[in-house]
Amino acid sequence: MNMQEAAEQADVILDNTLNTIKPGVQWAHGITSAGHESISRDRTVMTIISDERRGAFLGIVERFWKESGYTIKSVNSSERTPAIFAQSPDGFGISLIIGGKGQAYFVVDSPCVQKSDVADPTTPPSYQGEYPLPRPNVHSDFWSANTPLPPNP
């Protein structure tokens, strides 16, 4: 596998992960980083994820990754910067980190691959706001709500 193929696989992983989140969130492409033998792609969620809804957001993603055969490598339960780190069956690392103001970041890192040129992602971002990216600025009646979800029966 070369860097371009790895970047395309990273985009598939990110697309599938973001498509599983319901209701959907708005996101923007982050940076593509090419190392000596690896590639990294990331996406920044521009929808505000409230403190009260972060657990649900993380839970949806973690369940999807487990159902997709990913191995959960570690979970950071910090209230300030919760995160999940996983690995796909084909060796790609993926992480979800929630930072300041409820901004979520997804990052996919490839395993070792052959050096090649890498094109920009082809999936159009759902966020059409300003660049450089500000803190999350898209309100969601669901994800930005300040009330906790009721417990599952």
Image (cartoon, helix red, strand yellow):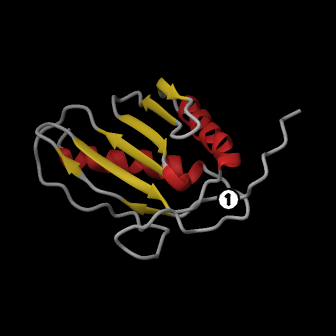
**Where the N terminus falls, by quadrant?**
top left
Please determine whether, in this image, residue 73 is positioned above or below residue 112: above
Q: Tell me which residue sits at (47%, 24%) in the image.
A: 74
Tell which residue pokes out farthest to the right in this image. Answer: 153
Front residue of this view, candidates 37 and 137: 137
Please determine whether, in this image, residue 83 is positioned above or below residue 23: above
Mark 1, Cα crowd under 10 Å, few <14 / some 14-19 / many 20+, is: some
SS for callout 1: loop
- Kind of residue indicated by mark 1: Ser
| Left or right, 117 with reference to 58 | left
**Where does label 1 land, which residue?**
144
Q: Tell me which residue sits at (33%, 28%) in the image.
A: 91
> In the picture, residue 133 is in which quadrant?
bottom left
Residue 17 position within the rendered picture, expressed as x and y whole percent measured from the top left: 51, 46
Residue 21 position within the rendered picture, expressed as x and y whole percent measured from the top left: 61, 51
| Left or right, 43 with reference to 4 | right
**Where the C terminus falls, by quadrant?**
top right
> In the picture, residue 64 is in which quadrant?
top right
Residue 134 position within the rendered picture, expressed as x and y whole percent measured from the top left: 43, 67
Front residue of this view, candidates 54 and 26: 54
